[in-house]
Image (cartoon, helix red, strand yellow):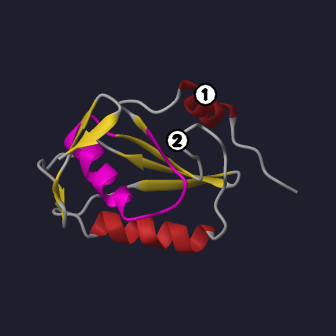
């Protein structure tokens, strides 16, 4: 039985990516840049298991994905605390606006500019 995303998550997906929302199909290396960018800006959410077109692809291994994201956030400078929630077969990563700006990752410093992350 496939679990469906909540109405709030469906609304975020329908509205598309923007200054406060980013879609990722999987937990890849670019997520660390997004975490840093959201922390250096106004905060935001990363929806993992959603492609750029807003299609739900889901996540296969929730525990592994959660562990990868926590490690990436912890390895930022300074470390960033994120909240990770499972919503159906998706993961929603809530990143607060940072209190100890600027934040960086091994690739440098990033911010959100409109719907994009910029170095």
Q: Quadrant of the N terminus?
A: bottom right
Of circles 2 and 1, which is in front?
Answer: 2
Label 2 neighbour load within 10 Å: few <14, some 14-19, many 20+ = few
In x, y percent, where is residue 8?
A: 62, 32
Percent of width and height locating residue 16: 52, 30
Q: Is residue 69 left or right of residue 3?
A: left
Q: Is residue 45 shown above or below 8? A: below
Residue 78 occupies which quadrant of the picture?
Answer: bottom left
Residue extending farthest front:
53
Residue 112, magenta (yes or no): no
Q: Which mark is residue 54?
A: none
Total residue callouts: 2
Residue appearing at x 13%, y 50% in the figure: 100
Report the side of 51 relative to 98 (left or right): right
Q: Are circles 2 and 1 on residues that touch, CB within 8 Å? A: no
For label 2, the SS is loop
Q: Is residue 107 left or right of residue 25?
A: left
Give residue 81's position: percent from left, percent from top: 32, 58
* CA separation in Å, label 2 and label 1: 11 Å
The residue wearing badge 1 is: 14
Instruction: Please determine whether, in this image, residue 49 is positioned above or below residue 97.
Output: below
Which residue appears at 65% of the width and 33% of the height?
Answer: 10
Q: Residue furthest top?
A: 15
Q: Give yes or no for residue 23 being in the magenta stretch.
A: yes
Picture coordinates of residue 91, whole percent (x, y) = 57, 54
Q: Is residue 96 left or right of residue 15?
A: left
In this picture, which residue range is highlighted in magenta? Answer: 22-43
**Dot 1, how many residues are within 10 Å of its Cα: few (below 14), some (14-19), or many (20+)?**
few
Location of mark 2 (residue) = 52
Residue at the image point whose x is 76% and y is 44% from the top? 4
From this view, report whether residue 14 is shown above or below residue 21.
above
Q: Who comes first in sequence, dot 2 or dot 1?
A: 1
């Amino acid at each position: 039985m496939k679990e469906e995303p909540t109405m709030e998550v469906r609304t975020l997906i329908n509205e598309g990516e923007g200054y406060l929302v980013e879609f990722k199909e999987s937990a890849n290396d670019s997520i660390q840049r997004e975490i840093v960018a959201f922390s250096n800006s106004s905060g935001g959410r990363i929806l993992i298991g959603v492609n750029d077109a807003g299609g739900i692809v889901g996540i296969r291994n929730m525990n592994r994905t959660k562990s990868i994201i926590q490690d990436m956030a912890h390895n930022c400078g300074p470390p960033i605390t994120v909240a990770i929630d499972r919503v159906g077969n998706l993961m929603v990563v809530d990143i607060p606006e940072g209190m100890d700006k600027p934040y960086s990752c091994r690739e440098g410093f990033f911010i959100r500019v409109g719907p994009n992350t910029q170095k």
